[in-house]
Image (tube, rainbow, N blue to C red):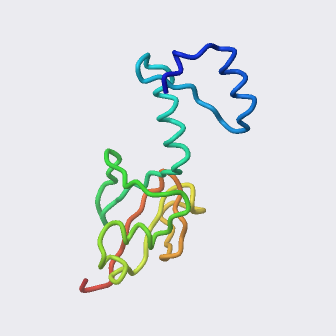
């Protein structure tokens, strides 16, 4: 912060000494605030999972936010604590499967923008 109070030469020297990504930020002058937000978001490895109720339409307006590497089991746990117990199988459309509507288990790793339908056990 307060990058606007330091001269350029000092900044360039500092960048060469620090052997990682450096983002010059000043909240006061609104310098690189959006870039900082993007970098933080990228480092958190968030992915979007769209839910589709059985026999219904996909909700593309409000994705479920998950982390890269999450499984269908992780998604079930995010939705409700009993969802994993009631889980029968999942149907997925997206990059993580070979064909749309592929049947998957709890250990399936989801990818960004996958569409997931969770089928519960009968009577649940």
Residue 73 falls in which quadrant of the image? Answer: bottom left
Q: Is residue 2 above or below residue 49?
A: above
| Residue plotted at (70% across, 28% down) | 15
Give how far across and how far down residue 90 sits, in percent. Answer: 43, 71
Give how far across and how far down residue 43 sits, in percent. Answer: 55, 46
Q: Camera-side residue: 63 or 89?
A: 63
Q: Is residue 7 above or below residue 92?
A: above
Left or right: residue 124 versus residue 35 is: left
How many labels were placed on the picture? 0
Left or right: residue 4 versus residue 120 is: right
Give how far across and how far down residue 93 sits, in percent. Answer: 48, 59
Left or right: residue 98 versus residue 13 is: left
Q: Camera-side residue: 28 or 88?
A: 28
| Residue plotted at (49% across, 22% down) | 2
| Residue plotted at (73% across, 38% down) | 19
Q: Quadrant of the C terminus?
A: bottom left
Give how far across and how far down residue 56 sits, in percent. Answer: 29, 59
| Residue plotted at (38% across, 71% down) | 76
Q: Camera-side residue: 45 or 51?
A: 45
């Amino acid at each position: 912060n307060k990058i606007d109070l330091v001269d350029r030469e000092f900044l360039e020297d500092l960048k060469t000494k620090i052997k990682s990504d450096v983002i010059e930020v000043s909240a006061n002058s609104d310098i690189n605030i959006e870039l900082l937000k993007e970098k933080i978001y990228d480092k958190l490895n968030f992915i979007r999972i769209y839910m589709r109720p059985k026999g219904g339409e996909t909700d593309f307006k409000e994705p479920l936010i998950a982390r890269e590497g999450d499984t269908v089991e992780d998604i079930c746990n995010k939705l409700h604590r009993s969802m994993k117990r009631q889980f029968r199988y999942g149907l997925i459309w997206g990059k993580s499967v070979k064909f749309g509507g592929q049947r998957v288990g709890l250990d399936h790793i989801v990818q960004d923008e996958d569409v997931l339908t969770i089928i519960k056990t009968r009577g649940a």
